[in-house]
């Protein structure tokens, strides 16, 4: 008997954010105010990125350089996206032009950081400089079990100002900044995805089992169907096959009896990013007798797709 499994994928998306303004040290605006990353796949995908620009406006004419950092809404390290419904999301970084991470937990003070200073132009107050940043959602290399859903965070920023001699003379702390957003779609991945054969051989056993490996970020829809209506049919038999040319069998999938053909199940529990196994059992009611000699076979097609 042959077994064929097929899997279907899914797609990702994002959303979020707002501009912000500081007052005494320097004012900063952000474009876009909501930084939306490409959709994120925690099962097989890599890192995803999106960029934004910070425009820094000097408040004091003596400001020669500034240090700018971004603070997450939580105290956790490393910082990560958040969701009220789905829990913790992907880890992220905010990288400056030199590839240095300037994203920190909520309680980190800009005065304690050492990332490079950003030069500001000389001239009257109001002169500005634009700086590009890359938001990097890190690949799920440690296999964290991330659920499907919308994730995001509302950043604050802290900025520190220096004069021409790099002497500190002011800062603005924890000012509302841009927002970040990313979506983890409902994904299903079969790790047992190639054709498999279950063989009763000479019927020394009445049960055959295949453990179907799968991973998912959310619930799963199941479609299981057979070519011969859950019957092993002798090759070369007429259609419909006479009683002496087929052997009826039953199926259990993940502990559930398959009572119809096709068998449709919606929103089965999620398998998780780490994956699980669903036992597929084929069962004969009794030792076959009164059957013509020959090779008997059926084809089972199992299709798993994202639920809702």
Image (cartoon, grey):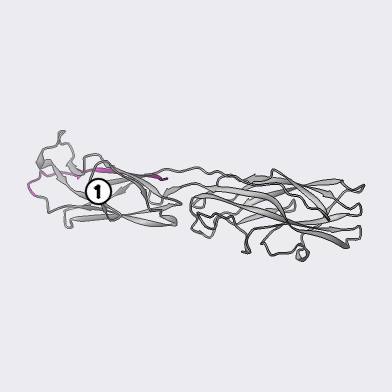
Left or right for 64, reference 177: right
Judged left or right of residue 262, residue 202 is left
Q: Is residue 45 visible?
A: no
What residue appears at the point 58 percent right and 48 percent down from the top-left corner? 182
Q: Position of residue 259 (x, y in %)?
A: 22, 46
Taking the view exactly as shown, the residue that stands out farthest to the left is 290
- The reply to whether the magenta stretch includes residue 148 is no
Q: Examine the rendering and report whether any part of residue 241 can be seen.
A: yes
Which percent across, then down, holds residue 249?
Answer: 18, 48
Q: Is residue 146 left or right of residue 152?
A: left
Is residue 298 inside the magenta stretch?
A: yes
Residue 185, x across and y down, in percent = 49, 46
**Other residues around mark 1 within 10 Å, as few (<14) / some (14–19) / many (≥20):** some
**Residue occupying image coordinates x 31% and y 49%:** 196
| Kind of element beneath mark 1 | loop
Task: Check the image and name the residue furthest to the front.
Answer: 23
**Residue extent of the magenta highlight:** 289-308
Figure label count = 1
State the residue lying farthest toward the top.
239
> Could you tell me which residue is drawn at 69 percent across and 43 percent down?
32
**Location of residue 83 (image quadrant):** bottom right
**In which quadrant will I find the C terminus?**
top left
Residue 264 position, x and y percent, is: 30, 43
Residue placed under numbered mark 1 in the picture: 258
The residue closer to the viewer here, 68 or 189, is 68
């Amino acid at each position: 008997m042959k077994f064929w499994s097929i899997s279907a994928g899914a797609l990702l998306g994002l959303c979020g954010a707002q501009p912000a303004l500081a007052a005494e040290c320097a004012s900063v605006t952000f474009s876009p105010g909501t930084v939306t990353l490409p959709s994120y796949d925690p099962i097989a995908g890599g890192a995803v990125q999106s960029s934004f620009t910070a425009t820094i406006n000097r408040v004091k004419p003596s400001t020669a350089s500034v240090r700018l950092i971004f603070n997450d809404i939580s105290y956790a390290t490393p910082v990560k996206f958040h969701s009220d419904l789905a829990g913790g999301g992907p880890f992220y970084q905010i990288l400056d032009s030199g590839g240095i991470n300037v994203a920190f937990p909520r309680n980190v003070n800009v005065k304690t950081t050492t990332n490079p200073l950003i030069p500001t132009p000389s001239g009257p107050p109001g002169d500005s400089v634009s700086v590009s940043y890359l938001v990097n959602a890190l690949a799920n290399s440690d296999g964290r079990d991330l659920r499907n859903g919308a994730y995001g965070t509302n950043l604050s920023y802290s900025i520190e100002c220096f004069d021409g001699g790099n002497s500190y003379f002011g800062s603005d702390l924890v000012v509302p900044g841009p927002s970040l957003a990313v979506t983890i779609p409902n994904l299903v991945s079969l790790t047992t995805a190639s054709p498999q054969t279950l063989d009763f051989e000479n019927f020394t056993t009445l049960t055959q089992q295949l453990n179907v490996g799968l991973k998912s970020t959310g619930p799963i829809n199941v479609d299981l169907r057979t070519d011969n209506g859950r019957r092993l049919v002798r090759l070369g038999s007429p259609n419909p096959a006479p009683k002496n040319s087929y052997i009826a069998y039953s199926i259990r999938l993940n502990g559930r009896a398959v009572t119809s053909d096709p068998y449709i199940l919606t929103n089965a529990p999620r398998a998780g990013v780490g994956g699980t196994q669903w036992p597929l059992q084929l069962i004969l009611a009794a030792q076959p007798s009164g059957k013509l000699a020959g090779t008997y076979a059926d084809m089972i097609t199992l299709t798993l797709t994202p639920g809702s």
